[in-house]
Image (tube, rainbow, N blue to C red):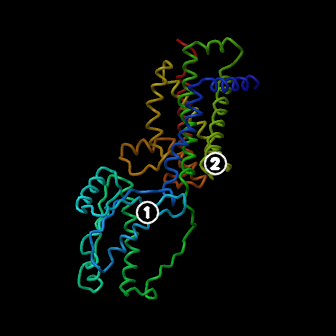
Amino acid sequence: MRKVLRLAWVSFLTALRERETLFWFVVFPVLLLALLAGVFGQLGQEGKMNFAVALVNLDHGAAGFASVVEEAFVSLSIPPQPGKEPLLTLRQPTAGEDEERFVAREQEAVRLGERAALIVVPPGFSAAALAAMAGSGSPARLQVYFNDTSAASSMVVDVVGRVTARLNREILTLAGLYQPDAAAVIRTEWVGEASAPVAYVDFLLPGIVLMAFFVGGLFSVSGTILFSRDLKILRRYWVTPLRVSQYLGGFALGYLAMCVLQFTLLVVVGRVGFGATVSFAQPLAVSYLVLAAVTFLGFGFLIASLAKTGESGMAIANIVNMPIMFLSGLFFLVANLPLFLRVILYLNPLSYLAEGLRFSLGTGQVTLPLPLTFLVPLGWTGFSAFVAARRLRWDVA
């Protein structure tokens, strides 16, 4: 046992001394967590989301309904609190500016993605509103120009819809037609358990942990075995009393020690740097983490058994890495994929581990059958062990 522990310690220290290994398997996952959490972690939070929008009021009538609409959107360009971002950064025509040219210019800005939307209060808006309330005309309509290829633009359209619903009540109030006592009251009642929205960093952190384990197993495990074999380092082990089983045990413990280091750093950065609240101290979550480490250790042995040299092993690992990592839902929810991509998703052990781990932590729902989140990774582990036992060469030919 002492030989196994000594070999594990040597394997762990060797990995930390190699700059490339230290960067890709320790530093890079931390940087990726910081990048994604910093860029996307604030989306949807009040005071941290801002859209550039243009607004022009072409109705200069005396009824004043158009000005109510204008003031509603102007109010959204005021920060809710000191130091917070307003929801809208509003651009309007300056005094004396040609309004038609302004509309044409801002339409082009929306098309190019420089504005999220252009809101136009058309001529005759107030008169149309009065006629509609009198029952002698069609409803008054706002004109909203947006870019359907832009997520920000689509979100602004939803904001405009909410503002318009509120404005309808205000306009009726100004006209003396709104009766609060007669308004319909919505009574809500939860059926089942209510849950608070999950912060993006709590959704992201388990995915980054799994990514770190996966990349370490795929590249570090296979690369160490293959290059040690190519450089005839393994041959030196076999002339000692060390057995293959002892080498495998020590090597596996060294990899697991690296996983513990990766996990610890990521959790500390997630909690201290980005306010993650997810707790991994749960038996089911620990089971998924251990299963992930063992599954990806098997992946490393599988790659090592398929490759003839270290260079070919790294090439195979790179080919396998991208589709498995990005078609697993580690960083974002994966939905509505084409059929041929869904096949990869359903064969991908990382997909099942991600869903199972997030379910155990309460940061995601399981869309795949829960037993499969254990069975599929275990199947891949067994398959990898079977192939490696038959094909893996421990010495150069």
Amino acid carrying label 1: it is Ser
N-terminal of the pair, mark 2 or mark 1, is 1
In-image side of 200 versus 61 (left or right): right
Q: Do the residues bearing badges 2 and 1 touch, measured as CB atoms within 8 Å?
A: no
Q: Regarding mark 1 in the picture, which secondary structure is present there?
A: loop
- Report the residue at 54% width, 14% height from top: 230
Q: Regarding mark 2 in the picture, which secondary structure is present there?
A: helix
Amino acid carrying label 2: it is Arg
- Specify the farthest residue to the right: 2
* Res. 316 image quadrant: top left
- Report the residue at 59% width, 49% height from top: 274
- Specify the farthest residue to the front: 96
Q: Which residue is under mark 1?
A: 77
* In front of the other: 371 or 20: 20
Is residue 79 depicted above or below 62 in this figure?
A: above
Q: Position of residue 232 (x, y in %)?
A: 58, 12
Other-residue count near label 1 (Cα within 10 Å), few / some / many at <14 / 14–19 / ≥20: many
Total number of numbered labels? Answer: 2
* Mark 2 or mark 1, whichever is nearer to me: 1
- Report the residue at 28% width, 82% height from top: 130
Q: CA distance from mark 2 to mark 1?
A: 32 Å
Q: Position of residue 163 (x, y in %)?
A: 40, 70
Q: Position of residue 225 (x, y in %)?
A: 57, 22
* Res. 393 image quadrant: top right
In-image side of 381 versus 51 (left or right): right
Q: Which residue is under mark 2?
A: 271
* In front of the other: 141 or 281: 141
